[in-house]
Image (cartoon, rainbow, N blue to C red):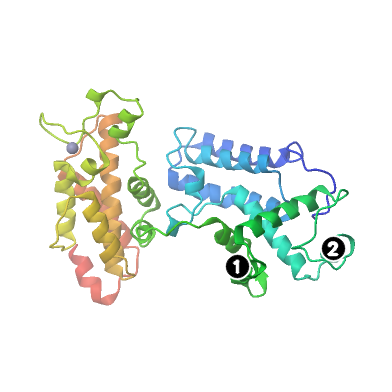
Amino acid sequence: MPQISKRLSFLDCSPLISKVSDQLQSWQNRRHLSYAGRIQLIKSVIMGIQIYWTSNYILPIKVLEKIDKMCSAFLWGNKIHLVSWSEVCKDKEHGGLSLFNARYWNYSAGIKLLWMIHTKKDLLWIKWVHENYLQNQSIWQIQPRKNDSWMWRQLLKVRDLVISRFGSMGNIQGVLDSCLKDGNIQISSIYKAISYSSATVNWSKSVWGGLHYPKHSLIMWLAILSRLLTKDRLYRMKILEANQNQCVLCTGSANRPESKNHLFFECQYSASVWNDMMEWLGFTWRSCDWNCVMNWFNNNLKGLGFMKKVKRMVLSATIYWIWKERNSRIFQQKCRSSDQLVREVKISVLMKVLQEKVPDHLRERINRL
Ligand SMILES: [Zn+2]
């Protein structure tokens, strides 16, 4: 396995690159895919290929960067990348989409090899490494030598990165112990341990936890990160002129500029939809201020109860449908009244709820919806 002696070049990895690229291209051509659909596809096949390759070899950084770039371009459909790949690759509790960054994955796979060598796992290549390379020295201390193979030197580079990242051997041991499961070390756990240092976000449950439709979660995620291409952003990017930035949901002559906060839920149209939804759920509390609504949900509705899940779903569905309405007014010149939109939100919520096993004590309440 890691005994390839010569340098693994970009060219050596071209079969992998073309495999990934062909696969992405065929999906791209096949049909219109939603973001949620793209995420599923990236996860399923690309990760399969990546995991296969990178668990066995430490690939050149250039190759890994290329794979990351292709995945990112596929996700955003070669348009503006709304969220950077490194953000996307954080897990959901840290504000990302839990996709894998090829570079970090490969680095984690290298750490797994180091650990296997360290614990003298009973494998032929590890015996070989101990006899030929280590000769009773520790993997954590051995210095690279002139005649070492390329792969061995790559492995020692990963080791140096680990040491500089975690400091002492005790720390490394602690981190690796936490990644053990039934005596085996999981690459995904190492990946988590090395890649997330930033604080967790308080909104991941509101966005992902519950009965949400994946496409609703994704739009809500983009809205929270302020990455939806609202007109105020398009204006700042110099894509729109100052006189083109009005909200399309406002009626009458006094159209307000479109920003995230205006669109969800300050705008009179969205406020009317949102207040109806709050009424529907039996909330007496009211707010049409984006930050207030988010804080309220993030703090008060994070539990696992069925009704809380329904309430969280209503928020993501409302955001989704308001965004959809805004887009259909701009791109298809189609208009729905706020009452019609309320109906759409309710239908999508009920369709999901009715597929679930409703707890007995809530059945009457759900039936009334
Ligand atoms: Zn408006």
Residue 175, disc: 1
**Residue type at tag 2:** Leu
**Residue type at tag 1:** Val
Residue 314, disc: none
Label 2 or label 1, whichever comes before in sequence order: 2
In the displayed structure image, the side of residue 284 where residue 85 appears, left or right: right
Tell me if residue 91 comes above or below residue 236 in the rendering: below
Toward the viewer: 40 or 155? 155
Instruction: Residue 302: name its quadrant.
Output: bottom left
Residue 104 is at least partly visible in this image: yes
In the displayed structure image, the side of residue 89 where residue 305 appears, left or right: left
Residue at image coords 63%, 61%:
187
Residue 134, disc: 2
In the displayed structure image, the side of residue 334 where residue 57 appears, left or right: right
Q: Callout 1: helix, strand or loop?
A: helix
Residue at image coords 24%, 72%:
362
CA gap, disc 2 and disc 1:
23 Å
- Ligand 1 image position (quadrant): top left
Instruction: Residue 292: name its quadrant.
Output: bottom left
Instruction: Using a 10 Å C-alpha cutoff, classify the residue at mark 2 as few (fewer than 14 neighbours), some (14 to 19) or many (20 or more).
Output: some
Residue at image coords 55%, 60%:
192
Where residue 79 appears, x then y in whole percent?
Answer: 46, 32
- Count of residue discs: 2
Q: Is mark 2 within 8 Å of ligand 1?
A: no
Toward the viewer: 192 or 330? 192
Instruction: Using a 10 Å C-alpha cutoff, classify the residue at mark 1 as few (fewer than 14 neighbours), some (14 to 19) or many (20 or more).
Output: some
Where residue 165 appears, x then y in whole percent?
Answer: 61, 57
Q: Are marks 2 and 1 in contact (CB under 8 Å)?
A: no
Residue at image coords 35%, 40%:
228
- Quadrant, the C terminus: bottom left
Residue 51 is at least partly visible in this image: no
